Amino acid sequence: MPRTALIAGNWKMNGLAGDLGFFGEVARAAADSPADILVCPPATLLALAAKTCSGTAISVGGQDCHARESGAHTGDISAVMLRDAGADYVILGHSERRADHGESDAIVRSKAEAALAAGLIPIICVGETQAERESGQAETVVARQLAGSLPENPQKMELVIAYEPVWAIGTGLTASEADVAEIHAAIRKRLPEPLTTRILYGGSVKPANAESLLSLADVDGALVGGASLKASDFTSIIGAVGR
Ligand code: 13P
């Protein structure tokens, strides 16, 4: 079964209202692309970004959500709220959330279940640290994160997995093609049939390496951090799909 590629930008804690011109610059490439195009701006810009992207081929998403629908959780945002603001997707369990906010696999799973219940497509992030890779634990760690973070009965729902080796994020280092292919195949093996779940690679994806990474088997797209902040870089990554 063919899987539509997904090119997703994660703006992390970057972006102000003055940056929304980005979407106009990317809209043409998105319209011409065979891939699904997604941008996850900070929550403060989500509703504005959704409005700006309405009628274009760009979807918007959140970067995190709370596991509950509403209640006394100061500063948190629920999946229902993201949906209400115009989000179609939400990134969950990013290594920066796991490290900065102590998010366990169980927390990520409960957030993924909340996201699905709200009609969002969760993008569940997994990936090993440098020490884990150096000690030969990369696949074991990713398998454990996957087993703990995926919602119950994942075969019934649309979700996306993002493999983001922690040591490749924001460092300019990218996993070798062989390592990416190996981990993506290992993830694919652990996903239930039918094999429609998309697996993205993330970690220093840029115009110069996008084409080779995206051509690997089992790489169904990219989760792009730094290079998604510049319209020309993001556009050229979009252009690398299926080239
Ligand atoms: P960089 O592309 O900046 O390495 O970030 C990757 C990432 O964390 C995307 O979620």
Image (spheres, rainbow, N blue to C red):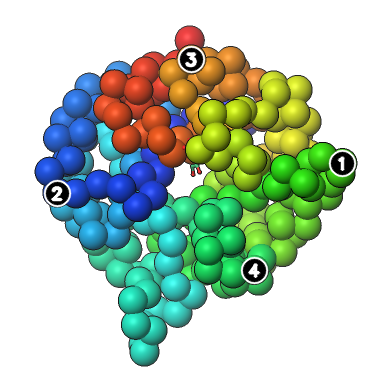
Residue under numbered circle 2: 17
**The N terminus, quarter of image:** top right
> Please, what secondary structure does the residue beneath circle 3 have?
helix
| Mark 4 residue element | loop
Kindly identify which residue carries mark 3.
Answer: 208
Label 4 or label 2, whichever comes before in sequence order: 2
Q: Quadrant of residue 93?
A: bottom right
Q: CA distance from mark 4 to mark 2?
A: 32 Å
The residue lying toward the viewer, choosing from 196 and 14, is 14
Q: Amino acid at mark 4?
A: Ser
Looking at the image, which is closer to me, 92 or 135?
A: 135
Q: CA distance from mark 4 to mark 3?
A: 34 Å
Density class for disc 3 (Cα within 10 Å; few <14, some 14-19, many ≥20) is few
Residue identified by numbered label 4: 104
| Residue beneath the point at 27% across and 27% down | 231
Residue at (59, 68) in percent of width and height: 103
Percent across and percent down for residue 173 are 60, 29
The image shows a total of numbered marks equal to 4
Which labelled disc corresponds to residue 203?
Answer: none
Is the CB atom of the residue marked by disc 3 within 8 angstroms of ligand 1's nearest atom?
A: no
